[in-house]
Image (spheres, grey):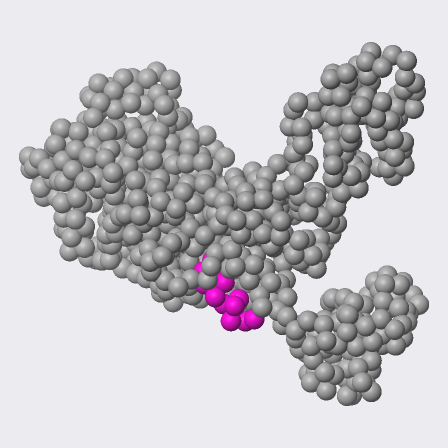
Amino acid sequence: MNTLRLVLANLRKAAVAEERQGYTNTGALGGFSVFLNGILPRLEQLVPGRNLTLMRQIALRYAHMSPLKRREAFPALLAEIDGLTEEAGEQRPAGEERSVSGEERLTAEKRSVSGEEQPAAAGGPGVCGRPSALSPGGHGKGAGISGFPEKVKDSSLQFLKGVGPERMKQLQGLGLETARDLLLYFPRRYEDRRLRSFEELRDGETASVYGTVVYGQVSPGRIKVIKLGIEQGRHVIQAVWFNRTYVLRQYPVGTRVVVTGKIQCQRHLCEILAADIESADGEGSARDEIVPVYSETARLSSKTLRGIVRQVVDRTEGLFPEFLGAGAGEKWMERAQAYREIHFPRSAESLALARTRLVWEEVLFLQLAVALLRRGPADAASPALNRDTGMVAGLLAGLPFGLTKAQERVIGEILRDMAGTKGMARLVQGDVGSGKTVVAMAALLRAVESGYQGAMMAPTEILAEQHYQSLEKSLTPLGVKIALLLGSQSRSLRDETLRRLALGQVQVVVGTHALIQESVSFRRLGLAVTDEQHRFGVRQRSLLRGKGESPHVLVLTATPIPRTLALTLYGDLQLSVIDEMPAGRKPVLTRRLSERGRPSLEKFMEEQMSRGRQIYVVCPLVQGSEMSDLVSAEERAEALQRRFPQQRIALLHGRMKGGEKEAVMHEFQRGGIHILVATTVVEVGVNVPNASVMVIEGAERFGLAQLHQLRGRVGRGSEQSYCILMSEAKSSRRLEVLCRTQDGFKIAEEDLRLRGPGELMGTRQHGLPELRLTDLSRDGLLVEQAHLFAQKVLAEPDRYQAVLEAVSGLYDSGKTGIH
């Protein structure tokens, strides 16, 4: 009988799971109907004299039944199971009821079915491409509350009241699957719903009023206008809805309600355009509250989300345990309380304290997460690259121009770092055209002088090819052997380069992502340089660093980074700034034109080409689209060819093969192409001193920092250069800023204010916590405080082990990167 009891126990567990999941045929792996049909033959063997016809009929029909029909059939099925259980002498487990609700559902997410784990409904915890939390993944630690066990599971939202399969799909559309996901879905704003008397209402404001429904009416016609008369004392105000006829049924005459909406007054008569209504218990009910408003979808309202969040908000103790001990340096609101208050604040003061704690925490976590990925150079001894054979001096002496004082200072800082055994981790920040390539050359030469190899990784093949040409021209005369490694190279050329690199016959290699592939090995890599670093993931840079025995790391960027963002993403790197432009460079004159000014523009382009100058024309799209009225690169190239039939016009975009792009760029650099029509593939690093005009079509569609980068493609020679912004936008703060200043740092700060940190420089995180609450343009003080605390944690990891454990639970370090 032990076998029969085991079979019946598994069958009952599957049935209970099916009931909990709303009769959706998901109570067992492969489907409840499949499980039931599979277990029946075994039951017939174990109880041969028993009539199982009813159970067999349910099993055969179950897959084709609607959830409602299944629900009607389920009592009979459970009665059959109970009868068999009693005959086997087995009592039903205490507390296991057919109807489950509330907190009982939350602890029953994964029950064993036939010896296997039941899959979490509608997927499991976590959403692909979305970070799961600001706190450790898995299970939180700490004492439970409201009867929850000490280790609170991050339960699926499927088992909450009011969350069925369809609602679960809607939540998944917002990336919400678990209680942790939901608690990290912060409100986008708050409404002050403290109750107001009718006499206090003002036209145009949003307010909450309390009263009793005294009448309801609906207008005839296609658009239904629903009005409820709300009485407060001796005054009545009308609440108005459109096409929401259910309001009349849900709130009949006599119902006490609280209505929130926008006040509209005409001739001393006021109406409230209702956004929300709820029943009230009485005038003494606790309605004076600050209400969270969440980002919503057409089928998932903020009110619905608010109700679901309220069901899990008491689980913050288990999901977000405190990691700060005594002496943390600041008196922050307790962590679990901060997560409760950010959703349902008791007052404006408590909301401010909660936000302060969580902003500080998410910036701290992001800083530590990035720092932990870069710990290699600081933790392991690096080779001391301190041998000076005169190569660096020879390079600088042979330059056709003199270095700026800023370049000399930065080269000195880099060479001092490389001379020590503590790995260099330095970020060189310099505006477009400030001369970062020469700085990188000096660092690479010092590595070669010291008997080591150097590697330089660029984000695009065009930029890698250009760096290779520059290095070959400057370093080959000094006896340095240089190679280029690209993904588009032929197999034979690539294999030969890899062989020479592994033998040490190549001293400096330039390449793209191809440099970090497993097949690439170095004999003695001493310096890794990455250019335009924000286009690489942290993980990608770590892989390049891992090609050697803790090589020194030099990171270059032409995108000025606001201090708050630099502290957040690069706070562990030493910072060098090239804040001086080479002598003789003229500022690029920047003007904005509409389509009406195109004839004047074309005449100007003709004049420039007659002087032997070349022109860039950058478009937001490669091809035209019916869904967009933006001009495409292909269309603009055809139009320009018709306008300038005697000039050579070429296309360049990311869909072209590597060889084609390389040929076009080479011809443009040689002067064989007069107008290069391109997409933003030319944004980074392309250097053609003879190009003096940059025309940007649909300029309002580009980010401010991106426009500044594009403008930096001209103005590289001694001639006056121009940037023309074509835009039909009536007003654009971004374009006004670009026309007003050439200072990349001012532009970056303005870009941060306009766009926010999520988009600036493409810093979208993968596997790292997002900046969900932080506004880097106004939370500078908290960023500074987080940076100082992060340095303490990194300096004394044993003292702050709980903090590091919290961070390590956030992400898979093998997959994390910032793009």
- Residue 491 in the figure: left or right of residue 468: right
Verify whether residue 351 appears in magenta.
yes
Foreground residue among 783 and 33: 33
The residue that appears at 69% across and 85% down in the rendered structure is: 200
Verify whether residue 664 appears in magenta.
no
Q: Residue 702: give x, y in percent of width and height.
A: 48, 54
The residue that appears at 46% across and 62% down in the rendered structure is: 333
Q: From the viewer's perspective, is residue 449 above or below residue 735?
A: above
Number of numbered discs overlaid on the protein picture: 0
- Whether residue 632 is visible to the viewer of this picture, yes or no, is no
Magenta-drawn segment? 347-358
Q: From the viewer's perspective, is residue 40 above or below residue 716?
A: above
Q: Residue 305: give x, y in percent of width and height.
A: 67, 55
Q: From the viewer's perspective, is residue 779 above or below residue 59?
A: below
Q: From the viewer's perspective, is residue 52 above or below residue 713?
A: above
On-image quarter of the N terminus: top right
